[in-house]
């Protein structure tokens, strides 16, 4: 029997009606059965401050404990001012410390970036990718996912209403599963 992979999804938007979160939820619904994708919250993480490592805020510990056992990480991000939102960068920083105990290290990853605009948050995608290089996360290179016009792709029930996008996301997730299995610790 194929082992089911535990994938955590880190979503870069805190917005209630976030397209990015809805996109991940739609993707999780059509993922292969062998891939279980669960969104982990980042909205309650206090801003990273090294001074607090002496007595870390409980949300930091809960977040690290959830990432640590995961088989892989799916990052999904909108773009703020041609980069990733601060909330996502904060979550990355929280997971990366204390020094030598990063929960990200060697965990296979993939990135989906999205925007209502045409460029699909390319800038955010690649700023994020730069962090993942330093964090030693093998990050899937192909297919790339820059989802433009995201506000027009989701149906009333949150489904991926656009057939081409749906096919693309299915293929993306199949590739990500293979990537995670190849890089399994
Ligand atoms: C944006 N937005 C935006 N879009 C884009 O394509 N490139 C950008 O650089 C920016 N910059 C930006 C900065 C800030 C502070 C905000 C609030 C928004 C628009 C953004 O794509 C849009 O608000 C999305 O809906 C955000 O994603 P969620 O929250 O729907 O997932």
Image: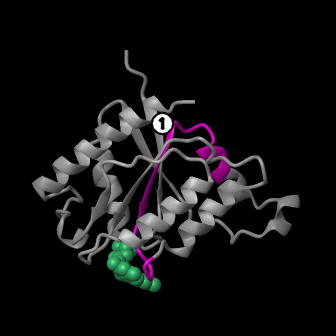
**Quarter placement of the N terminus:** top left
Q: Which residue is mark 1?
A: 6
- Magenta range is 63-82
Characterize the local packing of mark 1: few (<14), some (14-19) or many (20 or more) Cα atoms within 10 angstroms.
Answer: some
For this orientation, the residue located farthest to the bottom is 81
Q: Is residue 162 left or right of residue 5?
A: left
For this orientation, the residue located farthest to the right is 54
Q: Residue 26, position in %: x, y?
A: 28, 53
Quarter, ligand 1: bottom left
**Quarter placement of the C terminus:** top right
Q: Residue 113, position in %: x, y?
A: 36, 64
The residue located at (55%, 55%) in the rendering is: 132
Q: Nearer the viewer, residue 180 or 66?
A: 180
Please tell me in which quadrant of the rendered image residue 153 appears: bottom left
**Residue 104 painted magenta:** no
- Regarding residue 64, the answer to whether it shows in the image is yes
The residue located at (36%, 30%) in the rendering is: 34
Q: Residue 54, position in %: x, y?
A: 88, 59
């Amino acid at each position: 029997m194929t082992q089911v992979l535990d994938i955590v999804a880190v979503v870069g938007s805190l917005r209630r009606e976030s397209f990015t979160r809805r996109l991940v939820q739609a993707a999780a619904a059509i993922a292969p059965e062998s891939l279980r994708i669960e969104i982990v919250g980042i909205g309650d993480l206090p801003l990273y401050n090294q001074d607090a490592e002496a007595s870390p805020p409980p949300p930091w510990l809960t977040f690290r404990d959830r990432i640590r056992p995961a088989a892989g990480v799916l990052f999904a991000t909108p773009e703020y001012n041609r980069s990733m939102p601060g909330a996502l960068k904060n979550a990355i920083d929280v997971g990366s410390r204390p020094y030598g105990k990063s929960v990200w290290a060697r965990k296979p990853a993939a990135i989906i970036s999205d925007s209502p605009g045409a460029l699909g948050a390319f800038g955010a995608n690649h700023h994020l990718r730069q962090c993942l290089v330093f964090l030693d996360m093998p990050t899937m290179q192909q297919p790339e996912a820059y989802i433009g016009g995201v506000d027009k792709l989701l149906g009333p029930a949150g489904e991926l209403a656009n057939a081409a996008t749906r096919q693309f996301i299915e293929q993306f997730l199949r590739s990500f599963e293979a990537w995670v299995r190849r890089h399994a610790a």
